[in-house]
Structure formats: structure tokens, C-alpha cells
Image (cartoon, grey):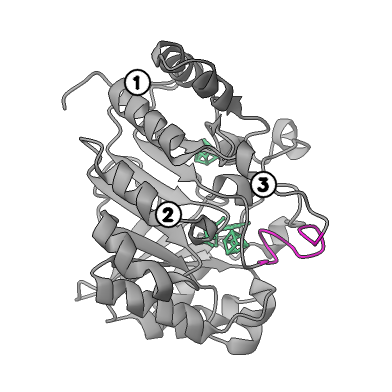
Amino acid sequence: MAMKPLTDTLGRPLRDFRISVTDRCNFRCTYCMPAEIFGPDYHFLDKSELLSFEEIVRLVKVFRKTAGIEKVRITGGEPLMRKDLDKLIAMISDVAGIDDLAMTTNGSLLPLHAQRLKDAGLKRVTVSLDTLDEERFQRINGRGVSVKKVLQGMEAAEKAGLGVKVNMVVQKGLNDGDILEMARFFKGSGRILRFIEFMDVGNSNGWKMDQVFTKQQIFDTINFETPIEPIEPRYKGEVATRYRYSGSNEEIGIISSITDSFCSYCNRARLSAEGKLYTCLFASKGHDLRSLLRKSEDNEEITKAIEGIWRSRTDRYSDERSSSKSASREKIEMSHIGG
Ligand code: SAM
Ligand code: SF4
Ligand code: SF4
């Protein structure tokens, strides 16, 4: 559908829509939902606070009509903790013009759900896995879940016909020593591995700059063993810098929000499970769309709100990270908007 893009104050179009379907998770990754903070007394959203599947699909349609979005990614918390997720997938994949429907997951529940998700219209999954070392992985995920379980999830996804990518968050001194083993393991597997710099999302993971293993360091680590070369981006604003092992088509990616930010191309809108719209991963506040959804059956007001929010968007947190303006800011937790 050729339509005029909806652009923000910096000329960035809204293209990519990420939907968090739950704030709950069966893991307690130390860098995302540390168990000391997300403990038994933590107040997660009640069911009535979550957007219903119908409400989510209504918003997908409005975003499609208003901004021409073609890509939707389902995330969380852990999206597979949301009951009957395959029903939502089927409803979104029925929306005309949504050509790319993907999900980010910790993979542990994929053996139970992969086939149903594929049958419902899901195309691809990104599975998070930070190390192949059992002891370290169990410590990182905070729930003693084994690497095997996640690998079984990837296998189940592939068996069902879903494309699989892998995300590894690299933290200096924790798992930077596992980069090469991960690269070797996934080379030739058909699963593209992407390394992510540890980010200062939220206010609970105690992020410090000296815990960041940088894009350059990740590049050097791999390139030292097997030379890699950059691949031309497929489109402006691609989040991962892509590389191939020289002389092959084997690909890896590095996502460098910290040391090589990409705000000038950022085209993502994020919806929290309770229906707040965030225009930046590091935003302090979201815009409440749920009350608009529940106020009237008419989409006019929602359309206007989305247009107004995006047109006035100025976010470029990662570009400004080191400035004092960004340093003390309250930020939404990653488990609310899903990365
Ligand atoms: N639970 C799902 C999962 O883990 O894939 C989906 C939600 S999770 C918040 C989305 C992605 O964000 C995961 O790949 C996770 O590793 C990444 N992530 C979480 N906290 C992060 C941080 N502080 N820095 C970089 N990436 C982070
Ligand atoms: Fe859960 Fe994903 Fe956050 Fe880990 S990164 S705690 S799996 S939401
Ligand atoms: Fe986009 Fe915000 Fe990340 Fe910049 S910091 S790339 S504006 S989400």
C-alpha cells in the first residue's frame, strides 16, 4: 500500500510495531528482571489491566491504516506466558498488509507451542540465549533453566517451519568469554546469531558503562579467530550491523545501542501490555491508548492520538546517553516493553 509515511520531528517514519503481551516471565534474567526486585511481592499487571486480543488487533489495524506498518513483533515479558497466544497470532496475521509477524522469546516454552504458532501465521522467532555454559546460563536466567531446554525450543521452532535467530546479550566479565563458543556453535546452523551490547534499560539492572563489552570488542574477538566483513544493510535503519564470515554467506550481527547508536533511523513504536505507547526503549513515560480504546468504538480519536504522538516525537536517548539530561532519567523496565 503506497501511502505517505507518518514521520516525527527528525523525519523518521513509523514502520515497526512491537507489542508486549505480558509483563510476566518464567525467567529472572539478572540484567532484565533481577529476582531481588521482581520477587514474590512484585505487583504484576492484573488481567483486567492487560489489553485484550481484540484491543491489540484494533490497534494493529489503526497503526496499519495510519502509518502503513507492515512489521509486527510480539514480545514481553515472556510472550508465551500469555494464554492462547496462538489465537492472537492468528488474529494479527489476518490483518491485511501485515507481512512480517515475528516474536522474541526466551525459547523455553517453544516445544509446547511452536507448531500452533506457525499454523496461526507466525513467521519467525528470535530466541534469547546468552551462553552455552550450563552453570552460567542457569545463574543468568535466575531460575535454573538449562541451555538444553532453550536449544530444544529452537529445534521445535525449526521443525515447525519457523525462521530462527538468536540474541546474545554480552556483559563484560560475565559472558564475553563465551562469544567464540556461541559463534562456533551457531555457524552453519542456519540460525543467525546477534550479539547485543548490554544496555541501561530500566532502573533495576544496575547498569554501568564498564560492564559493556563493545561492538568493536565483539568484532575483534570473532575476527581474530575467523575474519568477518560487513554486509550492506538491507534497508536504512537496520538495527543490527551485519557481517559475514569472509568467503561465505554465513551471517552474524552486532546490535550496538551503546557505542554506535542508531537513533537517527529509529522507526519503532512499542506498546506495553497495559496499552501504553512508547516511542523510545528508554522512555520515562508512555501514552495511554487503553483508555481511548475503552472509551469509544470509534477509532478516530486513537488515530489522531497516534499521529500527534509520532509527529511530535523527539527521542534520541542513545545519541544523548552521556549528557547530563539522560543520566538521571527514570526509565520504563525492559520487561514492560520487550526490547
Ligand atoms: N522474554 C523474551 C526474551 O527474553 O527474548 C522477550 C522479552 S526480552 C525483554 C527481549 C530481549 O531484550 C531479549 O533478547 C533480552 O536478552 C534483551 N534484553 C533484556 N534486557 C537487556 C539489557 N539490559 N540489555 C540488552 N538487552 C536486553
Ligand atoms: Fe524474561 Fe526475557 Fe527479561 Fe529474561 S530477558 S527476564 S526471559 S523478559
Ligand atoms: Fe530508538 Fe530510543 Fe533506541 Fe534511539 S534510544 S534507537 S530513539 S529506542
Q: Quick check: can you spot residue 266?
A: no
Closer to the camera in the image, 13 or 138: 138
The x, y position of residue 322, in whole percent, is: 68, 41
Question: Which of the two labelled residues, at mark 3 and mark 1, occupies the earlier sequence position?
Answer: 1
The spot of residue 281 in percent (x, y) is 57, 41
Element under label 3?
loop
Mark 1 CB near ligand 3 (8 Å cut): no
Q: Which residues are magenta?
A: 28-40
Q: Determine which residue is flagged by label 2.
A: 85
Q: Amino acid at mark 2?
A: Leu
Q: How many marks?
A: 3
| Disc 3 residue type (three-letter) | Glu
Which of disc 3 and disc 2 is earlier in sequence? 2
User: Residue sitting at 78 percent across and 37 percent down?
Assistant: 328
Q: Is residue 34 above or below residue 223?
A: above
**Mark 3 residue crowding within 10 angstroms, few (<14) / some (14–19) / many (20+):** many
Identify the element where label 1 is drawn. Answer: loop
Local crowd size for mark 2, using a 10 Å CA cut-off: few (<14), some (14–19), many (≥20):
some
x 39%, y 68%: residue: 113
Task: Return the residue at label 3.
Answer: 333
Residue 149: % across, % down: 49, 82
In this rendering, the answer to whether 192 lies above or below 3 is below
Q: Is residue 139 left or right of residue 83?
A: right
- Left/right of residue 224 with respect to residue 106 in the rendered view: left
Q: Which mark is residue 6?
A: 1
